[in-house]
Image (tube, helix red, strand yellow):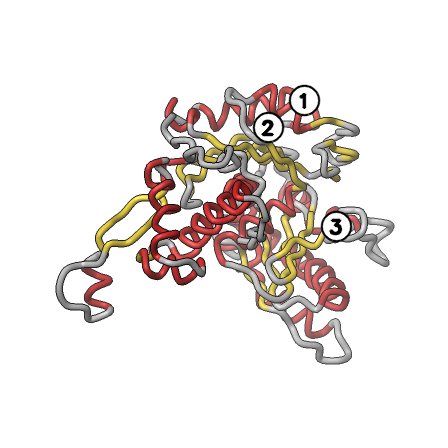
């Protein structure tokens, strides 16, 4: 998570800085003693204790005994230490991904652990924006208790779209949206008044993966569904480019392809269409295709080989431009990569005259929910920052209780 704490001048700002710094530090380390927290915050025990007391009374931080496992690992004798940790149920954050052919949604708690997730088929291009957002909200709210909704602190929405900082979709050609205030539509559809953020789906995917694993160096994220989106992280920070469009590798034209773009060669739609034509069946889906590749069905293997060649070419171009340390694949199509990884490596090797360093290529741990998870993490990140409205009270006012 990015360090958003800065030094303020007024007592109110200093107090807010300290609260946010304490929450960020406990979140980053999962569990800390009071003495360790004070050291990391650069405070004396008394000042740090006041912050901890306020967060404890507000229901965001709790004390727990150091586990027996920890004591054995550290060979400690005597009574277990008292540790500070976040209260997972103190806050919840919702993320919704609106795709071309599906909607997925997830809920994470204050520890950024997934508490619920769901995915359904949905024909977004044939629906209004309002219908798509309402479906996403209904999908995940149905998995939440009243208490979770009452303690929800933010809603994130991601979509395959170009989105301005004010939450307006300027263009989403693959789903037919243009000049749409996605943030306001989300605000109208959600049952609680919470902060809302909207983001390109590939960027949200990048944020989510970096939340799980941390990111250093340069990482390229490819989200492969019907379209192919890209996100770029540099030392843990999202690189947007001059107009917010950095990483859009899917829109790159491929020489010798008859004017096709990468997403038309390696996206979900082309795989399904080609396999249906190859075997003469109209209702084959992606999972059946992946199963046949795994079982080495010749028609499926041939299509997978062509896909691996196109993916290798796309990755080579990205490597020349970005020189990434790591490439992370997500989306439903990413499940194909492990079955053809060796072929992709061969094609990448054959495609370069000079042996440039090759990045590590991995599939996200939860590729199909990565964008929804990342959308929720955007609001989790905001909550543990100076942007949070939760801790910006008047001087001396207590932190608002998580259960109020």
Give the residue drawn at x 85%, y 58%. 255
Image side of residue 176 versus residue 403, left or right: right
Say which label, 3 or 1, has the lower sequence index.
Answer: 1
Residue lying at the far left in this picture: please name it.
78
Say which label, 2 or 3, has the lower sequence index.
Answer: 2
Residue 226: x and y, percent? Answer: 67, 41
Of marks 2 and 3, the one in the foreground: 3
In front here: 24 or 136? 24
Asked whether the viewer can see residue 286, the reply is no
Q: What numbered label is drawn on residue 309? A: none
Q: Are marks 1 and 2 in contact (CB under 8 Å)?
A: yes
Secondary-structure class at tag 3: loop
Image side of residue 203 versus residue 105, left or right: right
Secondary-structure class at tag 1: loop
In front here: 279 or 290? 290
Local crowd size for mark 2, using a 10 Å CA cut-off: few (<14), some (14–19), many (≥20)? some
Local crowd size for mark 3, using a 10 Å CA cut-off: few (<14), some (14–19), many (≥20)? some
Mark-to-mark CA distance, 1 and 2: 9 Å
Mark-to-mark CA distance, 2 and 3: 24 Å
Q: What numbered label is drawn on residue 248? A: 3
Q: Say which quarter of the image contains residue 233.
A: bottom right
Residue lying at the far bottom in this picture: please name it.
354
Secondary-structure class at tag 2: loop
Quadrant location, the C terminus:
top left
Asked whether the viewer can see residue 268, the reply is yes
Say which label, 1 or 2, has the lower sequence index.
Answer: 2
Residue identifier under label 2: 122
Residue identifier under label 1: 127
Give the residue drawn at x 43%, y 25%. 149
Local crowd size for mark 1, using a 10 Å CA cut-off: few (<14), some (14–19), many (≥20)? few
């Amino acid at each position: 998570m990015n360090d958003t704490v800065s030094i303020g001048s007024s007592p109110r700002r200093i107090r807010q800085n300290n609260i946010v710094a304490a929450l960020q530090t406990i979140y980053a380390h999962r569990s800390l003693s009071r003495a360790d927290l004070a050291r990391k915050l650069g405070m004396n025990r008394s000042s740090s204790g006041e912050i901890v007391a306020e967060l404890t009374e507000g229901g965001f931080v709790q004390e727990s005994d150091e586990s027996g496992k920890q004591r054995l690992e550290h060979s400690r004798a005597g009574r277990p230490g008292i540790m500070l940790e976040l209260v997972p149920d103190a806050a919840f954050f919702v993320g919704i991904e609106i795709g071309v052919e599906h909607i997925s949604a997830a809920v994470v708690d204050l520890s950024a652990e997934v508490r619920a997730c769901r995915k359904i088929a949905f024909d977004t291009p044939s629906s209004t924006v309002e219908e798509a957002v309402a479906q996403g909200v209904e999908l995940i709210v149905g998995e939440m208790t009243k208490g979770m909704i009452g303690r929800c602190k933010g809603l994130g929405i991601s979509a395959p779209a170009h989105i301005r900082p004010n939450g307006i979709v300027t263009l989403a050609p693959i789903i037919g949206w243009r000049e749409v205030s996605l943030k306001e539509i989300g605000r109208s559809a959600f049952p609680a008044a919470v902060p809302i953020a909207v983001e390109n789906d590939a960027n949200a995917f990048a944020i989510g993966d970096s939340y799980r694993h941390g990111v250093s160096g340069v990482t390229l994220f490819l989200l492969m569904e019907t379209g192919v989106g890209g996100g770029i992280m540099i030392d843990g920070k999202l690189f947007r480019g001059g107009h917010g469009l950095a990483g859009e590798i899917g829109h790159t034209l491929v020489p010798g392809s008859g004017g096709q773009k990468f997403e038309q060669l390696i996206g979900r739609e082309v795989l399904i269409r080609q396999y249906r034509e190859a075997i003469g069946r109209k209702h084959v889906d992606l999972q059946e295709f992946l199963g046949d590749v795994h079982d080495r069905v010749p028609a499926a293997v041939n299509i997978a080989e062509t896909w691996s060649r196109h993916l290798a070419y796309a990755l080579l171009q990205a490597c020349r431009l970005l020189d990434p340390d790591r490439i992370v694949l997500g989306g439903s199509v990413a499940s194909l990569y492990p079955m053809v990884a060796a072929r992709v490596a061969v094609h990448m090797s054959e495609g370069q005259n000079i042996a440039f360093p090759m990045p590590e290529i991995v599939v996200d741990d939860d590729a199909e929910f990565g964008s929804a998870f990342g959308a929720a993490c955007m609001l989790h990140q905001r909550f543990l920052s100076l942007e949070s409205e939760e801790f910006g009270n008047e001087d001396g006012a207590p932190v608002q209780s998580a259960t109020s």
